[in-house]
Image: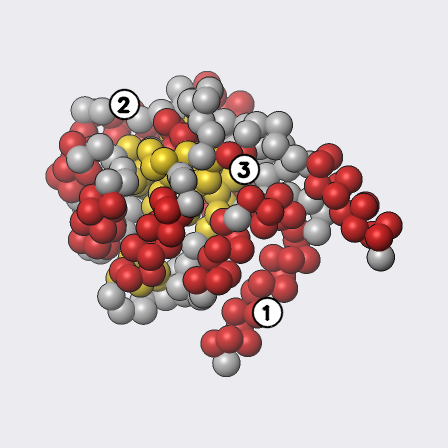
Amino acid sequence: MVRDVSLLIEVSRKYSDAAGVRDRLVLGYHVISEASVSPRTVAVTALSRQVSALLRTGYTATTFSAAVLDADGRDRLAVTFDDGDSSIFEYALPILAELGVPGTAFVAVQRVGAPGFLSWEQLALLAAAGWEIGSHTMTHRRLPDLDDASLDAELRGSRLTIEERIRVPCRSIAYPYGDWDARVRRATARAGYTAGCVTGRALDADVLGWPRVGVDGRDSFTIFRLKTSRVGRSVRDTPLGAPLDKAGRVARSLARG
């Protein structure tokens, strides 16, 4: 037993924090609502409780790019939202404003203005409120599956369109479905991005592949605290991470049953 614990510690150190990952916590949300719409829906009260609890532990909230690019970014918290659901403006903005927290919204350009999604006017208002507006590509396709020309169009086109429409720099991206590889990373850098994020494990984390902790409506507050703890994130980035993620999915399924 002692030998097993020692081995776990050794493995954890091997896969630890070369990029300062566990000093900087990035949360990934999708939909915030007063009613459960899908497993990804986080209740309004849950978002407030989760972020408030992290602030009380000493985190300083900032935007995604500021959190990961700050050379002295210890204890930084970034709250990010993928897909551009309209609930971000309706619910997340006032909650985070009350807490003094700027958010980061990653939007798929061709969804902007569609029913149920943020409009360009709302994105401009978010930016004016101190939020970062990042890219989720043009059409939310799986980037590793694309040829070079299509990949460049998804990356460069979305960045330039966002900058043109809301008149603020767009330098960060959330890869759709968390899918990326070395070729995508190189294309992302060529397209002018300086920060990028994925959800889940990232053994080779850097500023263009920063790991987020995904949060959804299936997470109890206890599970949320475990997932966001430094210990929990350290273990997830070891070979034990995959089986622990599977165990977590089973536990949530049993809890719903």
Question: Would you say 84 lies left or right of 90 here?
Answer: right
Mark 2 Cα shell of 10 Å, populated few (<14), some (14-19), many (≥20) = some
Distance CA(mark 1)–CA(mark 2): 41 Å
Residue under label 2 = 169
* Coordinates of residue 106 in the picture (x, y in percent): 33, 40
Q: Which amino acid is tagged 2?
A: Pro
* Coordinates of residue 115 in the picture (x, y in percent): 20, 55
* Coordinates of residue 177 in the picture (x, y in percent): 48, 47
* Coordinates of residue 235 in the picture (x, y in percent): 65, 47
Mark found first going from the N terminus, 2 or 3: 3
Residue under label 1 = 250
Distance CA(mark 1)–CA(mark 3): 26 Å
Disc 2 is placed on an element classified as loop
Position above or below: 238 against 21: below
Position above or below: 84 against 87: above
Residue 117 in view of the camera:
no
Question: Would you say 46 lies left or right of 98 here?
Answer: right
* Residue 120, picture quadrant: top left
Quarter that holds the N terminus: bottom right
Residue under label 3 = 22
Q: Residue at x 46, y 40 (%)?
A: 25
Q: Which amino acid is tagged 3?
A: Arg
Q: Residue at x 62, y 27 (%)?
A: 18
Distance CA(mark 2)–CA(mark 3): 27 Å
Question: Would you say 56 lies left or right of 128 here?
Answer: right
Disc 3 is placed on an element classified as helix
Position above or below: 50 against 162: below
